[in-house]
């Protein structure tokens, strides 16, 4: 039965990675959180949550720098 949860977690991780690559960070975080619900021991989901968080911060910083330069 545990393998079903792991398979679902892998599915949600793949969906989240797709959303993150499109710049849809909020949706990506939702998918990664779902994968953690399915498989709480998933380190991949935890790492991806941090990656998305850092990508969001990087985007915000670049946006602020553009406004400062103009």
Image: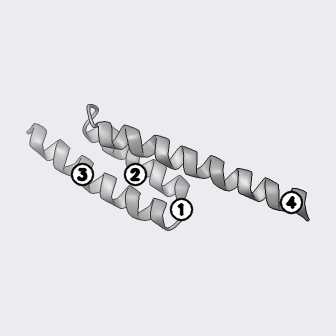
Badge 3: how crowded within 10 Å, few (<14), some, or many (20+)? many
Image point 10% across, 43% down: which residue? 3
Residue 6: image quadrant is top left
- Regarding mark 4 in the picture, which secondary structure is present there? helix
Q: Earlier in the sequence, mark 2 or mark 4?
A: 2
Q: Residue reaching furthest front?
A: 69
| Image position of 58 (left or right of 50) | right
Q: CA distance from mark 3 to mark 4?
A: 39 Å
Which label sits in the foreground, 3 or 4? 4
Q: Indicate the position of residue 65 as horizontal and vertical percent values.
A: 80, 55
Circle 2 residue: 31
Q: Which mark is residue 37?
A: none
Circle 4 residue: 67
Circle 1 residue: 24
Circle 3 residue: 10
Q: Earlier in the sequence, mark 2 or mark 1?
A: 1
| Image position of 51 (left or right of 32) | right
Image point 30% across, 36% down: which residue? 43
Image point 31% across, 58% down: which residue? 14
Image quarter where the C terminus lies is bottom right
Q: Which of 27/59 is in front? A: 59
Q: CA distance from mark 2 to mark 4?
A: 32 Å
Image quarter where the N terminus lies is top left
Q: Earlier in the sequence, mark 3 or mark 2?
A: 3
Which label sits in the foreground, 2 or 4? 4
Image point 45% across, 43% down: which residue? 49
Q: CA distance from mark 4 to mark 1?
A: 22 Å
């Amino acid at each position: 039965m545990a393998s079903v949860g792991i398979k679902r977690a892998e599915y949600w991780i793949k969906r989240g990675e797709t959303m993150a690559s499109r710049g849809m960070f909020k949706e990506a975080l939702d998918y990664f959180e779902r994968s953690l619900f399915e498989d709480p021991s998933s380190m991949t989901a935890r790492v991806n949550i941090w990656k998305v968080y850092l990508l969001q911060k990087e985007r915000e910083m670049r946006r602020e720098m553009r406004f400062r330069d103009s």
